[in-house]
Image (cartoon, coloured by chain):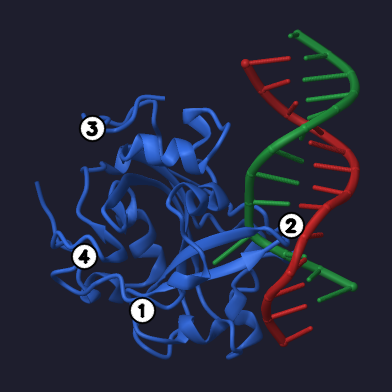
Chain colours: A blue, B green, C red
Amino acid sequence: MPMSPLPASFYLQSVNELAPQLLGARLVRRTGRQRTAGYIIEAEAYVGESDLACHARAGRTPRTEIMYGAPGHAYIYFIYGMHWMLNVVAEPEGSPAAVLIRAVLPSEGAETIAARRKKARPKDWANGPARVCQAFEIDNRLNGIDLTPPGICADNEQDNFLWIETGAPVLGKDILTGPRVGIDRVPEPWLSKPWRYRIDLSTWNLPPDAYRV
DNA sequence: AGCACGATTAACT
DNA sequence: GTTAATCGTGCTC
């Protein structure tokens, strides 16, 4: 089986093109020799300084600096006193845009994920941005890492990595859009922009290795 | 002061 | 089975 990480050029496009294209892509995490993977099934686009739902609305700060950097890097932040969120930086350097990974359908490493998610039922393993980070053991140690370098898939038990690779095909008819969630205090028009993208699991041709929920 | 959330509870079908 | 309300927790600016 494949693969190599999606290249930096893939992340160069605008967030609202990138977010739907990330659906069906495979998120892969390796910690030592443990490998965990799954299909991205939900993502949200955060457009930049003008988007009042985007952290970059505050301009360049120590936290948002990563978003201003090169595409294809991880922007990971902490919120609500307990949760980590995984984003991927898009668009050219200097343009602070990112895609929030909101949900993943696991395909590999079910035992590892079950251990990390403790008592959660399989259907709740990674259906939420903080749950994705728990299931894949993602926290600030990975903030700013490059998701794109080739060769990181080589079997090296010492490695501790995160990347995204080509996964399963998703047709346009299988993509649902709607307003972003969890941004209630954000004013219009940003509150209602349909920049949330998710796979309609009732019609999608589920890849054979996806964990059945 | 406010927050790109989730676990738990409590009320419903 | 569902939806609605509550609030913990600590980082950011």
Residue A86 place in picture, x, y as percent: 48, 62
**Residue C12 placement, left or right of A17:** right
The residue mark sitting in front, 3 or 2, is: 3
Secondary element type, mark 2: loop
Sooner in the amino-acid sequence: mark 4 or mark 2: 4
State the residue position of label 2: A184
Q: Earlier in the sequence, mark 3 or mark 2?
A: 2
Judging by the rendered image, the residue that carries numbered circle 3 is A209
Give the residue displayed 39% in from the left and 41% down from the top.
A112
Q: Do marks 3 and 2 share a chain? A: yes
Percent from the top left, x then y, of residue A92?
34, 85
User: Is the residue A11 above or below the residue A173 in the image?
Assistant: below
Question: What whole-number distance in Å separates the C-alpha atoms at marks 1 and 3?
Answer: 31 Å
Q: Earlier in the sequence, mark 1 or mark 3?
A: 1
- Distance of mark 4 from mark 2, alpha carbons? 33 Å
Q: How many marks can you see?
A: 4
- Mark 3 → mark 2, Cα distance in angstroms: 36 Å
